[in-house]
Image: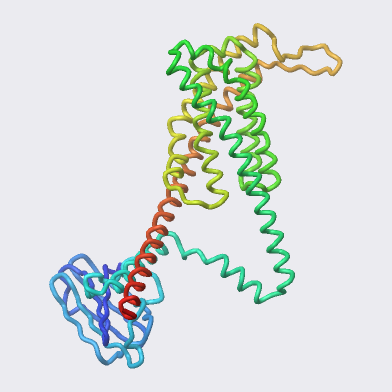
Amino acid sequence: MSSPPPVKWYQKEFFIGLLIDIIEPKKESVKVDVSETSIHFEAESSTGKHEFDITLHKKVDPEKYHIKVKDRRIKIVISKAEGCQEEWSRLTPDKHRWLKFDVDSVDLTDEETIAARKLEDAKRRLEAEHGPLPKDTKIQQMSNMLNGDDLSRDLELAEKEMYDMLRNSYLTIYNSVVWLGYFYVFFVSLLRVFIEGPGAIKTNYAAMSWLLRSCQQTVFLEIIHAATGLTKTSTLATVLQVSGRAVVLFTVVDAEPALQTSLMCYLLVVAWSAVEVFRYPYYIVQIYEFYFPKLMWLRYNVWIPLYPIGILCELYLVYQCIGLVTESGRLTVTMPNKLNVAFDFSSFLKLYLAATSIGGLKLMAYMGSQRTKGLKKLAKMKQMEDIYYKEKDLINIRKKKEGKKHA
């Protein structure tokens, strides 16, 4: 089976060149077909058969080319067609991962050419790995307005901008308020132990419970956010996440003072609040599509130690609560009664314990897949940042050239 070899291309004023890396090519097997707009190449070597076809960005003279075969490289030089002898911005309109521009062939004194080639290579790498570059949305909006009913499109655009402004402002305030609450819980919980010593672990929940309850009650709004489309999260996933934590906080920890003084309760409070300290700033950044790579990295990595700690603490506290509820009969409804309904809260906690054990594993797997997607997105954004700085360098070089011309 044939495969394309690594190829570099370069150009001069009157011709283009291809440098094809093949170890010990068989000279008699080298075949090159050149037309005005395409090149077909095939050759054999000790590693197998190599072949590729490319469509050219501009025309060449199919009668004027020569081939030179060496031990580790095949060189093809093809004359540019008349009318196509200006500098080519690219060799082919298509994208090939095995085809790159030969930076070494550029005149090293020409800063503009080097910067332009680096920018082109960076864009090609980004498009090869992540697809086409995003279009300029402002330009697209202007084009749409010119091609349709201007008045109706203006009204639609104004309504959308007003909705986005109100939505973004509300979500920013909401996320900021919840973040401040959890940050206070996280910071003060650590500070109390640092100042007062291990004894503060037993009294920490009593000191933080009012704010922890307030934060959890506020978080119920996230179910409405998901259901109404304010956020793009799944409504079902949000309900399960919010209600699961509420069960542990309000019916297990907050209702059983005997559990509040344990080390597991302290670790649960710290783990819960620590996760939110990094989650809500990330949400705010996402609202405005800002780029903070360190925050993104923390969002997709800090959960790795914190989620297992939180899940284990929840399981321990629920398990301990089952024995306490069995003795006290709290939240348990027995027969007979007017409604003729029975409910055993200890049995409910046993089911919850089993569901959390299975759900915790699934949650970890889901977060792992989200981490993979997030880090891939982060890599793409870093490449786009690299393209931005390369474009900036190219603009600065051109400005310097213009300044020298006018001097």
Q: Position of residue 5 (x, y in %)?
A: 27, 68
Q: Position of residue 147 (x, y in %)?
A: 66, 76
Quarter of the picture holding the N terminus: bottom left
Judged from this view, the residue extending furthest toward the front is 407
Quarter of the picture holding the C terminus: bottom left
Judged from this view, the residue extending furthest toward the left is 71
Q: Is residue 347 left or right of residue 101?
A: right
User: Which residue occupies 19% across, 75% down?
Assistant: 74
Write down the quadrant of residue 124 in the picture. Answer: bottom left
Residue 197 seen by the camera: yes
Q: Nearer the viewer, residue 314 or 150?
A: 150
Q: Is residue 121 left or right of residue 350?
A: left
Q: Position of residue 189 (x, y in %)?
A: 50, 21
Judged from this view, the residue extending furthest toward the top is 327
Q: Is residue 28 left or right of residue 329?
A: left
User: Which residue occupies 65% across, 19% down?
Assistant: 251
Judged from this view, the residue extending furthest toward the right is 338
User: Which residue occupies 44% across, 35% down?
Assistant: 302
Residue 53 seen by the camera: no
